[in-house]
Image (cartoon, rainbow, N blue to C red):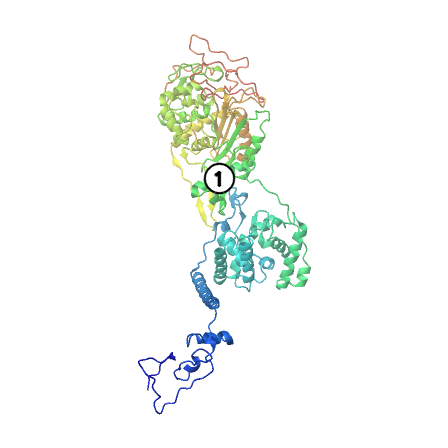
Amino acid sequence: MTERSSSPQRVSTRRTSSTPAQPPRSGQAPTRRSTRTPQSGGAAWASTGVQQTAASSTAPAGGGNGGDGGGKGTKDKDGGKGDQPRWKRILKITGITALIAGLVAVAVAAIGIMVIYSRLEVPAASDVALAQSSTVYWAGGKQEMAKVGEVDREIIDCAALPDHVPHAIVAAEDRSFYTNPGIDFTATARALYNTIILGNTQGGSTITQQYVERYYVGETTTDIPGKIKEALLALKVDSEQTKDEVLCNYMNTIYLGRGAYGIEAAAQEYFGKPAEELTVAEAALIAGVIPAPSAWDPRVSPSDAERRWNYVLDGMVDAEFLSQAERDAQEMPETVDYTTSDTFGGTNGYLIRAALDEAIATLDLTQEELEMGGYQVVTTFKRKDQQSVVKAVKAMPDDHADNLKVAATTVDAATGAVTAMYGGPDYLEVQRNAVTQDIAQAGSTFKPFAMIAGLSNGFSLETEYLSNDSMTLPGFENPVRNYAGVNFGWIDMVEATTNSVNTYYVQLNEAVGPDVTMETAIEAGLPEDTVGLDANAANVLGTASPTAMQMAQAYSTIADGGQKKDTYMVQRIIGPDGEVAFEHEDDAERVFSKDVIADTTYAMQQVVERGSAVKASALGRPIAGKTGTSNDNNSAWFAGFTPQIVGIVSMYQVGDDGSVQSITPFGGYSEITGSTVPTDIWVAMMGPILDRMDVVDFPDRANVGKAVNSSPSPTATEEPSPEPSETSTPKPSKTSTPKPTETSEPEPSETTEPPVTTPTPEPTPEVTATAQPEADGGGGGAS
């Protein structure tokens, strides 16, 4: 018995020569040949377990050569389902593979999204979302001076809002807000299609998605990864934050037109009231303009505004926020007029800019960080003081040259707080502050520093010098002049201060030391790098050119009894979190003794009582000060003070090329000196300010030091002695100042030529309306 093959065997029909055919063994049935073709190649027989025999000679022609390929012939003939064509097999395999790959990709993407979602953290709010206007306040922090910053926004606590305000927002923007999971899948798909396929930028549709865009992203997302992340973030936010929190942040950041970001700013812009006072109708109008706030503003398109207003109210009914009866009772509200304001316009612009600059330096912030950070800057500027200063400057005679500049400021003597400042007529036209940035030669306002230097170094007010006109003195190439060529003879420090006598102060400066005078000015408050501040013989005549603010600081040291402190304009800064970020602390340093300053202020009071600033005596209280006029009348000053407050007025004229010009006479004066228009302005601005203050006396004269260089013999009268020289004293002009007599106290004027200029007699100014002659001289040659 032969072994059965596991696969069909091919049997040859030919006999070999080596092996004869064997008859079948007994007991074995003969092989049966079938004349029918197997159904599927060898499959039919294989199922019986019997070996296939050689094919008969009558096998069909389609069978090929013997047993080879017999199955083919039968498939082609009978149309059986044998092997498929190659292309179908490839297509089938490719389809199955793609399906499996797709399922795997979806699974991987789903897992990836789940991982991203699980790891996604809600970020800090974007700077854009948190940006809000900063506010500048007048002194005290109650009266608003201005809002600054590019974004008009004020973040509020929504707990104070009536329910109909957030309900109006929901009815306008996302009526399923309280029930959806934070995203609208259909709307998100539509947004992706519009953004990616059509190229039209579109944001999320739900309030949560819009909130995510504005609060965390800061702008509309336009790419697929960004949209996916944004949607996931919306889901995350919705799961981690309450609906009320999301809605509140949304209301605080959404743009609502008229330059207003957030519901609080919008309430003010549309209705002139805080958001917590909005009515149902008003809230619906604001909510209605959200999709197109600039176009649907009722001042632009009343019809669109009303259409959207009705849409919101109907939505509030649908959401059961309002009853139909309540909705029917609503009337279209009237909005307030919308006007854009130039924040920095006018004189207040100088105050705002100066205060912001100081705040920026104090907190070490950039301008953008401060102005858009929601800070509250409380200044030292007193509104009434500012009004008094501005009014006084504007009342100045208007026949002056167009290029005349005026600087005026007031400073609290005890603290250094700047209470008022006139830096120019309009900051938007000229962004240069006349008080803090412009400089002018000090003239005779510098002389008190030489007096303090002398008194601090053993000299007394009784120290005398021969003080005639055109005296040749050490350190000067040319004779030193007194204003109007007046010879004062032997006078003490009080008289020299009262009449601002140049020849006296040059000699005092020489005795004390010009370097000591310079250091005294610096100790008082002038910066070391003040233009023209040098240790030379002429510095006492005011060759230095400080700003009005710097001079105010130095004089506040005198007014406060010798205690120096910096001037400042910012009292307090409150951060966006409501906490105090900065509070000014008074920090005074004693630089001069009380007694020295007591004698100084005594002498300076005489300037007001009977000298060049006698007009200020009309205010009826103790006032000390010093007038000053520079050479050729290029600048004119009056620096006056009481024990409580300092007032500074300076005046100068600038040419087209930036050069200093002689001040063109105006207002009925033949020339402009410190005792003319500057004193007039000072009196006008300080009168109302001082009326609000108690009358305070200066300390009594202390009589420090001892007299130096007393005259050999006192003169019999107060009339100045003639100049001791071979050449007669230059005669004043025909309108010369009368010499003092016992019955008429003069107000001799003051000036001097620069040390390198040949002296020439200067005419006396024309008689003023009060018939008081000018009494003001020095400063770089004049004062």
Vertically, is 294 above or below 607? below
Q: For residue 474, which quarter of the picture?
A: top left
Quarter location, residue 189: bottom right
Relative horizontal placement of residue 43, taking residue 398 as reference (left or right): left
- The N terminus lies in which quarter of the figure? bottom left
Decide which of 730, 708 is in the foreground and name it. 730
User: Dot 1 lies on which element?
Assistant: helix
Q: Amino acid at mark 1?
A: Ala
Q: Say few, some or many: other residues with alpha carbon within 10 Å of mark 1 (under 14 / 14 to 19 / 20 or more).
A: many
Q: Quadrant of residue 146?
A: top right
Residue extending furthest toward the left: 18
Percent position (x, y) of residue 760?
A: 48, 13
- Whether residue 247 is visible, yes or no, is no
Which residue is label 1 attached to?
A: 355
Q: Position of residue 606 (x, y in %)?
A: 47, 25
Q: Residue furthest top?
A: 726
Q: Nearer the viewer, residue 626 or 238?
A: 238
Give the residue furthest to the front. Answer: 17
Place of residue 534 in the rendered image (x, y in percent of width and height, measured from the top left): 39, 25
Q: Nearer the viewer, residue 643 or 649?
A: 649
Q: Position of residue 11 (x, y in %)?
A: 38, 80
